[in-house]
Image (tube, grey):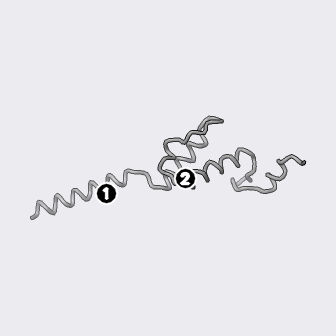
Amino acid sequence: MNHTRTAAALTTLLLLTACSSQPTYDESVQACAKAIKARPAGDKTKPKPCEPLKDDDYTLIVTSKAIDDLGWTDENGDFDENKMIQSTPSP
């Protein structure tokens, strides 16, 4: 009986250790954002660190990078509508 409890405890510990070695969703988001920023201009392939992300979250990261590249963000990295309007050519 004692061996059974020890084996169960070890199995649980191994499962918890294996699960905890996987990145959290937030860590995956951060890794994806870094990979998007590091990829070459014009590269549209989905980087491997972005694979665990939900489609909406991946799209948000890509869109955020595009808005930043267009110069439409302020010093805090937030979207600045005035910068967008100023950069848009008049008709």
Q: In this view, does 76 lie to the left or right of 82?
A: left
Q: Give how far across and how far down residue 19 sits, in percent.
A: 35, 54
| Element marked by disc 1 | helix
Q: Give how far across and how far down residue 31 sits, in percent.
A: 52, 47
| Element marked by disc 2 | helix
Q: Quadrant of residue 43?
A: top right
Quadrant where the image shows the N terminus: bottom left
Check whether the beta carbons of the residues at disc 2 and disc 1 lie within 8 A of each other. Answer: no
Residue closer to the observer: 5 or 64:
64
Q: Is residue 14 left or right of residue 23?
A: left
**Amino acid at the residue labelled 2:** Asp
Q: In this view, does 72 lie to the left or right of 50?
A: right
Residue closer to the observer: 27 or 90:
90
Which residue, given by chain and number where applicable, does mark 2 sit on? 55
Using the numbered discs, state the Cα–Cα distance from disc 2 to disc 1 in whole angstroms: 28 Å
Q: In this view, does 36 lie to the left or right of 2?
A: right
Q: Give how far across and how far down residue 6 sits, in percent.
A: 16, 60
Which residue lies at the image location 31% right of the left edge and 54% below the top edge? 17
Q: Give how far across and how far down residue 73 sits, in percent.
A: 73, 52
How many neighbours does mark 2 have within 10 angstroms: few (below 14), some (14-19), or many (20 or more)?
few
**Amino acid at the residue labelled 1:** Leu
The residue most toward the right is 91
Q: In which quarter of the image is residue 41?
A: top right
Which residue lies at the image location 69% right of the left edge and 53% below the top edge? 77
The numbered disc on residue 16 is 1
Query: Is residue 31 depicted above or below 81 in this figure?
Result: above
Whichever of callouts 2 and 1 sits on the residue coming sooner in the sequence is: 1
Which residue lies at the image location 57% right of the left edge and 55% below the top edge? 56
Which residue lies at the image location 61% right of the left edge and 42% below the top edge? 37
How many neighbours does mark 1 have within 10 angstroms: few (below 14), some (14-19), or many (20 or more)?
few
Query: Which-is-in-front pick, marks 2 and 1?
Result: 2
